Amino acid sequence: MLRGRKSSNIIEYRTRNGPFKDLHSVMNVPLIKHKTTEVVFNSILNPADRSERRKPKVQAVKFIKPQIERKRLEEASSVVSLVFGTNKIAWAHLERGRSVLEWQQEECDRFLRGAYQASVYLEDISPVVAKIPEADFFILEKPGISLQNTNLFPIMLHLRTVEAMLYSLLGARFQQDGQQRVLSMARTAVGKHFELMVGECRTSGAELVRQLLSDSVTQKHPRVAFPQSMVVRYRNMFRLGVRNHREEMCDALLQALAFYELLEGD
Amino acid sequence: MLRGRKSSNIIEYRTRNGPFKDLHSVMNVPLIKHKTTEVVFNSILNPADRSERRKPKVQAVKFIKPQIERKRLEEASSVVSLVFGTNKIAWAHLERGRSVLEWQQEECDRFLRGAYQASVYLEDISPVVAKIPEADFFILEKPGISLQNTNLFPIMLHLRTVEAMLYSLLGARFQQDGQQRVLSMARTAVGKHFELMVGECRTSGAELVRQLLSDSVTQKHPRVAFPQSMVVRYRNMFRLGVRNHREEMCDALLQALAFYELLEGD
């Protein structure tokens, strides 16, 4: 109930003055005010209260924040995975059967240009959010930039701004009955799942995406199924040698796939 | 129409090859593709187009971002000014006649505690936004922390996250007909207006707020009018010697007042 200085103050007070003579004298202890005593006394009189207040244990899924009941995640019939970079937002809409329903990106040209202005970010992000399809969960990439690297501060400020806006706009658009539907997924968890990590760094997932696109045509039970119309377009887009800067799109697709695969294999 | 390398490429091409023989040959110039030529030729054929596209000049109000038509600001019948700190959000609802309609703050205890999590921020900020009253404009304090001071970086990340979420949630709640209603106001502009600056730093506005509360009772035409019920409560709250940490509330009120006074005196 009490930790740190409050509890040590009580011990110190009793050592000096002996046991408390009445309930009221507890309030002579430094830091212990009316509210604290009320909470403590209540917890003694109604011990049940405390266990009731304890949150029911959820089976935590490590790679997803905030903590959410595993069952709800497993029952998701489709998720939209979003990945944002310095000037674009990409998303993949993947259903539980691993069919890609939508996969695209939007340019946000004014990101990181000139002075940071919340209104500019809002103007760029709102129309993107308006295009995001309905899904059971919206999974945002959790970028892992260390606070130690001061050179990357501006990038980090930028990414957190985009993250904060996506969280609140998606929340405002899709939230219902108070259920959390916007989640974060650790970028490194996805990287490790697909063996894309070199040390602490995650390497490009483009090669893997190319493979997935090929497999989708050649294999009977591919890991991810793309609609026929998509495969042709995207195989051209992602073919080797094309400098297309579509890393965010690759990452969005891989993150959606990792979400289902990690839940299954966990 | 064309700037930079595109225009210098055209000059270089003409220097080497002489005048263009036909319209199509323009596309031989490096960097000039079909789309560029279309835009340029169109602007020659329909010169009117161009001037039409020019935005009408707005009378810029320096201390407010984004740029907004002065007339719209002046016609605002009431504004809500919001100031956020490390663990609270304060707001003042002030009408054009300088009567305070609402003035309060909400604690956001989980800000800056433990790991930054967008979902926690959203959970703390959403209920605050739900309490914000309707107004013509919502003015957020633009905190002025320099990127140079790396120690303050966590604070800056925090403030930008709150700013980004307030922008998008207020936008989602109140935006209509695409009109910008969430604005930012430079903290130093308010500081200068009330002579609260010492060098580059803004000092506390609490003393000034105490004065305004007093004047509201004693003067016939006070700078700000508080409803009678508010004055008693707030004079106790802000009386000298009370360590109440209500800086954000003071700042929110002063910012709202500065908004009207600066517009008048500008």
Image (cartoon, coloured by chain):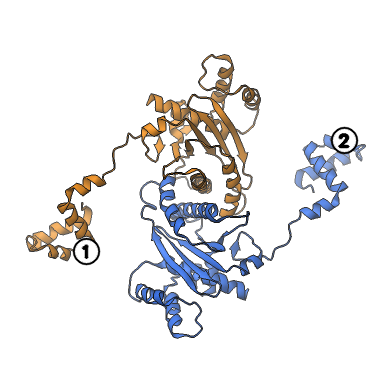
Chain colours: A orange, B blue
Q: Quadrant of the C terminus of chain A?
A: top left
* Amino acid bearing label 2: His
Which label sits on residue B24? 2
**Distance (Cα) linking label 2 and label 1:** 85 Å
- Find numbered disc 1 in the image and state the secondary structure of the residue it sits on: helix
Q: Crowding at label 2, few (<14), some or many (≥20) Cα neighbours within 10 Å?
A: few
Up-down relation of residue A124 to residue B230 (above or below): above
Up-down relation of residue B241 to residue A34 (above or below): below
Residue A209, image x, y percentages:
55, 25
Residue A144, image x, y percentages:
46, 40
Residue B88, image x, y percentages:
40, 59
Instruction: Answer left or right for B47 relative to B132.
Output: right
| Residue depicted at 61% across the width and 59% down the height | B66
Label count reads 2
Up-down relation of residue B56 to residue A89 (above or below): below
| Residue depicted at 63% across the width and 48% down the height | A110
Q: Is residue B33 visible?
A: no
Instruction: Answer left or right for A47 relative to B218.
Output: left
Q: Chain of mark 2?
A: B
Image quarter of residue B174:
bottom right
Residue receiving disc 1: A34
Between A26 and B23, the residue placed more toward the observer is: A26
- Find numbered disc 2 in the image and state the secondary structure of the residue it sits on: helix
Q: Chain of mark 1?
A: A
Which label sits on residue A19? none
* Amino acid bearing label 1: His
Q: Crowding at label 1, few (<14), some or many (≥20) Cα neighbours within 10 Å?
A: few
Up-down relation of residue A96 to residue A21 (above or below): above
| Most distant residue in the front direction | A177
Image quarter of residue A188:
top left
